[in-house]
Amino acid sequence: MIGRMDTHVTEKPAPQERDPDDDEDGDRRLANIVLVVGFVVLVGSGIWLANAMVTAKKADDCLASGRRNCFPVDVPARQQ
């Protein structure tokens, strides 16, 4: 026996199959994130629009009552 080495043929491990539930969880998570971001944008836009409408109504009421200085303009102080 002259230095004979046992060579074992090792089989490659079978590729692990992905569980379809994992894919569904990832898709569901992504969909939830997209929905939350959309909801936040929708609520923010609604709040901005409501504030803009209140400001416009106040200005309209002021002008309708005959006032002239409904929109105060800030003028810098004169330098002497």
Image (cartoon, rainbow, N blue to C red):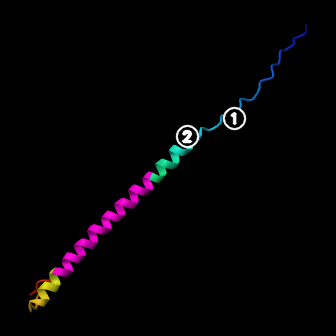
Q: Residue at x 52, y 49 (%)?
A: 27
Mark 2 → mark 1, Cα distance in angstroms: 17 Å
Element type at mark 2: helix
Quadrant containing the N terminus in the rendered view: top right
> Which amino acid, mark 1?
Pro
Using residue 12 as the reference point, say whether residue 80 is left or right of it.
left
Q: Position of residue 33 (x, y in %)?
A: 43, 53
Residue 44 seen in this snapshot: yes
Q: Where is residue 74 in the image (x, y as percent from the top left)?
A: 15, 83
Residue 75 seen in this snapshot: no
Q: Position of residue 9 (x, y in %)?
A: 81, 22
Mark 2 or mark 1, whichever is nearer to me: 2
Quarter of the image where one finds residue 22: top right
Residue tagged 2? 21
Residue tagged 1? 15
Residue 48 vs 2, above or below: the answer is below
Element type at mark 1: loop
Q: Is residue 52 magenta?
A: yes
Part of the protein shown in magenta: 32-57
